[in-house]
């Protein structure tokens, strides 16, 4: 018997002339890979419901416990058009897709992470700015949900509540060590170092929803350090992680370009 599943489409790859292999994150079963026969054929029954970054209702079943999920029908719930029509938003949407594909084993139900990712896409779809802050908040919550911290900057060795200065932390356990305890334990070169106040902000975000209880105003300096810290934490668990600050966002481009001796083409 076929069952309906609510799913976020993460990856969709053409297979042969008419078929498609689809990786999706479902509320009911977690990360799954499915086979959609005839998905590329003219007048197929799937439409755009199998496009990446689409929230869809999928009808299908497993023929055997170890087989690919067979997709029989799919309907779009939300296409997130605001993301598809904005190159910068597509980049911000792609970061959690890569993280989820790398961090989650298949067939493990993660309803809290599913709801978090769906909320992230809904907000990103509508927000015109503050996309970096939204990604920082999402990452902090995701790491907490998956059991990777981050914890408050309280030294695991001596119990010191570290307010200022640099701390060394273990991304595997989330534990933090002050400078003195780091010297006593011996420096571990691979363990990242960050500012205590930046780690405290990230720990606070990990316990809030994506919109937070109040509007947060971060300086460019704080936002940059938070993005770097998030990337360090994720890259500890995801090999070949692409740091967000290296991505070619259009927001970094000039507002006009010179096209002639005295002419400029506005990009606004």
Image: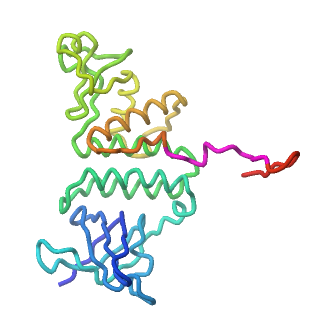
- Picture quadrant where residue 252 is located: top right
Q: Residue at x 33, y 83 (%)?
A: 73
Horizontal and vertical percent position of residue 17: 38, 83
Which quarter shows the N terminus?
Answer: bottom left
Horizontal and vertical percent position of residue 51: 42, 71
Q: Residue furthest right?
A: 262
Q: Is residue 72 left or right of residue 255?
A: left
Q: Is residue 186 left or right of residue 71?
A: left
Q: Residue furthest bottom?
A: 43
Q: Is residue 220 above or below residue 246?
A: above
Q: Is residue 116 above or below residue 53?
A: above
Horizontal and vertical percent position of residue 45: 39, 86
Q: Is residue 20 above or below residue 258?
A: below
Q: Is residue 179 left or right of residue 94?
A: left
Nearer to the camera, 153 or 177: 177
Q: Residue at x 57, y 47 (%)?
A: 129
Q: Is residue 168 above or below residue 34?
A: above
Nearer to the camera, 204 or 22: 22
Q: What span is in magenta? A: 247-258
């Amino acid at each position: 018997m076929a069952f309906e599943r609510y799913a976020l489409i993460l990856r969709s790859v053409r297979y042969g002339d008419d078929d498609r292999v689809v990786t999706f994150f479902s509320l009911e079963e977690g990360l799954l890979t499915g086979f959609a026969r005839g998905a590329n054929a003219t007048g197929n029954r799937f439409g755009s419901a199998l496009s990446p970054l689409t929230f869809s209702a999928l009808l299908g079943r497993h023929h055997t416990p170890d087989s690919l999920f067979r997709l029989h029908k799919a309907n779009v719930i939300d296409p997130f058009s605001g993301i598809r029509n904005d190159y910068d938003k597509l980049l911000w949407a792609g970061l959690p897709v890569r993280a989820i594909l790398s961090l989650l084993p298949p067939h493990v139900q993660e309803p809290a992470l599913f709801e978090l990712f769906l909320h992230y896409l809904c907000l990103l779809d509508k927000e015109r700015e503050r996309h970096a802050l939204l990604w920082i908040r999402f990452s902090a919550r995701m790491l907490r949900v998956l059991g990777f911290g981050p914890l408050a900057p309280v030294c695991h060795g001596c119990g010191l509540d570290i307010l200022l200065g640099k701390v060394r932390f273990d991304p595997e356990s989330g534990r933090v060590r002050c400078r003195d305890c780091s010297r006593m334990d011996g420096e571990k070169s691979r363990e990242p170092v960050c500012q205590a106040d930046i780690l405290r902000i990230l720990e606070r975000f990990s316990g809030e929803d994506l919109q937070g209880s109040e509007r947060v105003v971060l300086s460019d300096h704080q936002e940059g350090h938070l993005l770097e810290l998030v990337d360090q934490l994720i890259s500890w668990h995801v090999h070949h992680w692409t740091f967000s600050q290296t991505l070619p966002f259009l927001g970094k481009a000039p507002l006009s370009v010179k096209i002639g001796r005295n002419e400029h083409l506005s990009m606004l």
